[in-house]
Amino acid sequence: MMPIRWVVLMLACIMMIGNYYCYDNPSALQSQMKTLMGSKSPSGVLFGTNFNLLYTVYSIPNMVLPFFGGFFVDKLGCSYCLIIFSMFILLGQIVFALGSYYKSWTIMLLGRVIFGLGGENITVAQSALLADWFAGGELAFAFGINLSISRLGSVINDFVSPVLANSESVSFALFFGCGVCLMSNVTAFVLAPINYRADKLVDAVKDSDVGNVDDTLTKRLIENSSSSSSSSSSSKKSASRRSLGERSKSGERLSSMNLSIVGQAEQINVRDALHFGKMFWILSFSCLVVYGCVLPFNNVASGILLERNYFRDPSPGCTLEFSNLCINGPNAPQGSVKNKEINCTLDPNIAPVLPASIDAKCPAGTDCNQVFYNLTDIVEDDVDCSDPFWGDDVVGCVSDYCNAKDDATETSGKIMSIPYFISASLSLILGFVVDKIGKRAIIASLAPFVLVVVHLSLALCSGSPVLPLIGQGVAYSCFAAVLWPSVPFSVEEKSIGTAYGLITALQNSGLAIFPIIISAIYNGSGQSYIPKVEFFFVALGALGVAVGILLNVYDKLHGGKLNAKGGGDEQNESDDED
């Protein structure tokens, strides 16, 4: 029979898939959402602004919540918090999906705020849960498995959501996300009583004559009373409550965000931040700019890939033989299978040219959105492929265009999943590799350098985006693997929780501000991403390189603990000087 702690791990992984899947729903559906919502809202706000606000409003509450997530878990317990936070995620996704159904940006933004209230905090709860059930090398392994499987939720979203939106509707794709969240919510309801019962049994043991048995060991004894690990029961302190400093000293290395979240369970005192040394602030600024080069890029990656690679604008000389008639269907030129293109490049990644004007009636027996269509100077925003007049395979006016666009959005969704797929694949092993070789500060410099090369190539070159996105994924994974374990080296052990809370709040500050900057650049460039938005990411990467160099210089002048191998006691002394 499978030991119960591995059942707990499996349930914890499933529980997080809904969070990751739905967080990235907008990025996978950017093109379809633009068609649904139009290039401007009724109040005149451009699509690019409202779209990026979907990520800004998620991050704004999480500029504060990282200071309290661990507090909630400690006060209410993991079992209750798992249910509460998963309910916030499900409710937020439902409101977001309803907003798309009613075509209301206000409702959609409200949904993302509610989603954000649970999205980060549930990571706190599940990390504390795993810290209770696993110890030693098993804990690092459990966190790696959890992050890898959870991140697959983002990959699945990139593959599935565009297909659902193209075959059904944007609202259908988002309500499908509600179903994924419901699955995770049900998992939380299953997991919570398992953990609650174990907590009660642990409390009973601690109240008995062997009250010094640690929580983690007791839970393992509950699942297997014959476990040989009973010989370790002399541990005086709960493994689930050990400080991050002690974990670092023991050589444990958790990867990416999970390590940071565990630290938040420590007691937080904001006043401690006044005494943090230069190394902490250098790490914080590095986190701000490098994550700003990665996560906001993913928010708009679909749009960038469509514009750059998979749905490029036709050349200026490209036109239709009859520029005032449809490409396909009964409103195409009489006697023609379709309206032919003239002076156009034969490339499947170039969008079919649209008619210059249309004066037509909805074909008989077709449920069009309107009866008459009289348009001039037609552009992409005028074409709603969900309207049978435009997109129906039989009578649609521009069905070739709509089918090509559907294929392009699905292709871009698959390609944009590459960085997250790499992150899911590498997160299990990178923490252990870094612990063996050290070189944290060096890797923290090299990763943003790779990002500079990645975004310069996306801005200036026209080749396949696959290799650059592989570089993005490797750089992102490596940077996360060295950043979060470096924080305990920069502060006193008693301040580790505050340090993780502060650096996560600063990270979310960037994730709230950068999308607004990106939308301003996009709108100011005629709703185009290439090259100016990519140059913004290059600038962030270059700042990351400069900060990484400064980090190496500072680390060398103060003992070289970041670049040293392992995590011995002598390397875990904090950097307290100002």
Image (cartoon, rainbow, N blue to C red):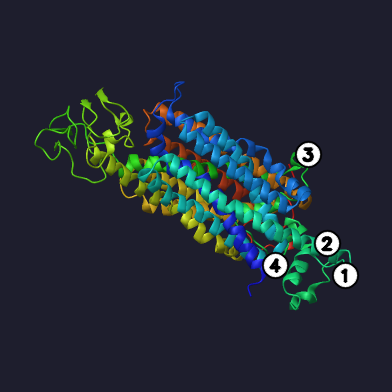
The residue at the point 81 percent across, 72 percent down is 233
Helix, strand or loop at label 2? It is helix
Residue 397 location in percent, x, y?
22, 34
- Decide which of 524, 301 is in the foreground and name it: 301
User: Split into 4 quadrants, where in the image is the C terminus?
Assistant: top right
Instruction: Report, in whole angstroms, how far the alpha carbon at label 1 lies from the one at label 3.
Output: 38 Å
**Label 1 belongs to which residue?**
210
Q: Is residue 372 above or below residue 553?
A: above
* N-term mark: 3 or 2: 2
Determine whether label 2 and label 1 are within 8 Å by CB.
no
Which residue is farthest top?
Answer: 43
Give the residue at mark 3: 271
Q: Foreground mark, 3 or 2?
A: 2
Q: Are marks 3 and 2 in contact (CB under 8 Å)?
A: no
- Eyeballing the image, is 359 above or below 137? above
Q: Position of residue 461 (x, y in %)?
A: 32, 44
Left or right? Give the position of 273 relative to 366: right
Residues under labels 2 and 1: Cα distance? 11 Å
Nearer to me, 120 or 289: 120
Q: 540 or 36: which is nearer to us?
A: 36
Q: Which secondary structure, mark 4?
A: loop
Looking at the rendered structure, the kind of residue marked 4 is Gly
Determine crowd level at label 3: few under 14, some 14-19, many 20+ residues with C-alpha closer than 10 A.
few
Cβ atoms at labels 3 and 4 below 8 Å apart: no
Q: Which residue is mark 4?
A: 136
Specify whether 384 is left or right of 573: left
Q: Mark 4 or 2 closer to N-term? A: 4
Quick one: label 1 or label 4, which is nearer the N terminus?
A: 4
Amino acid type, label 3? Arg
Q: What residue sits 17% from the left and 32% below the top?
A: 331
Q: Which mark is first along the chain, 3 or 1?
A: 1
Amino acid type at mark 2: Asp
